Image: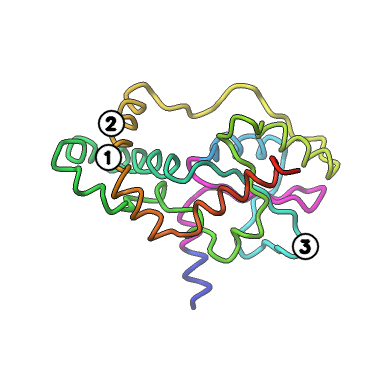
Amino acid sequence: MEQQAFDAFRNFFKSPIYRSPNSKLVYIPVLKNASSYYDWVFSQANWTEIQYKDIHPDEDYLFGFISEPMTRYVKGVVQDMISHGSENILCNMLGVKFWEFAPILGIHSVPMTVIYPELYNKINWIPLDHRKINAKEVLQDILNTHGEQSVQLPQERMNSAAPWQKRLYDDIGPKFYGAGHTWFKILYPDEYPLYQKSIDQYLNN
């Protein structure tokens, strides 16, 4: 029953997990970490959609994309607010106290370590937002190492935020720093160490 409940939780995120038909590569998606872009990339390459239960972490090479936890969280909150139509209520001064406790408003703002509690330390995370790490080059190296020739990586971004969405992000973001940032680290203690670990594996080699 517990496994069924977790499978239902994972499927709720509606972002496909993809397996290569030619190797042991498995892409693990995370909303707000270029998941729409890579959904398109791997579907175009005819990778196979699989369920969470079909992942074999001791046999598969798991990879996904990671970004600075608070940045991803705020972007997710903005997306969830837009989805629920609540941006006009929570952006006024009355919303400042609300943001101090790092609320989860929907599927986009759930922390990565909550989405994949038993798996996140077994995934090879590629940083998306570090100035010294080129995520596409890292992914290309992984694909080449595993003999993948079918995946093409277009230069253009997909699903970019509209100007008004960026303004909303700029308005909400500062409300988190301080108490909200502290509460986020207390509630989700593994988020920042996971992000730092993903950076260190590339900068320290």
Residue that label 3 marks = 59
Q: Nearer the viewer, residue 110 or 84?
A: 110
The answer to whether marks 2 and 1 mark residues whose Cβ atoms lie closer than 8 Å is yes
Q: Residues within 10 Å of mark 3 (few under 14, many from 20)?
A: few
Is tag 2's residue or tag 3's residue first in the polypeptide sequence?
3
- Is-magenta flag for residue 121? no
Camera-near label (2 vs 1) is 1
Image side of residue 56 versus residue 103, left or right? right
Residue 1 position (above or below residue 112): below
Q: Residues within 10 Å of mark 2 (few under 14, many from 20)?
A: few
Mark 2 and mark 3: Cα distance apart in space: 44 Å
Task: Tell me the number on the disc at residue 137.
Answer: none
Residue that label 1 marks = 175
Q: Position of residue 118 (x, y in %)?
A: 58, 66
Q: Nearer the viewer, residue 45 or 124?
A: 124
Range covered by the magenta-colored residues: 9-32
Camera-near label (2 vs 3) is 2
Under mark 1, the amino acid is Lys
**Circle 3 — which element?**
loop
Residue that label 2 marks = 171
Q: Residue at x 64, y 50 (%)?
A: 49
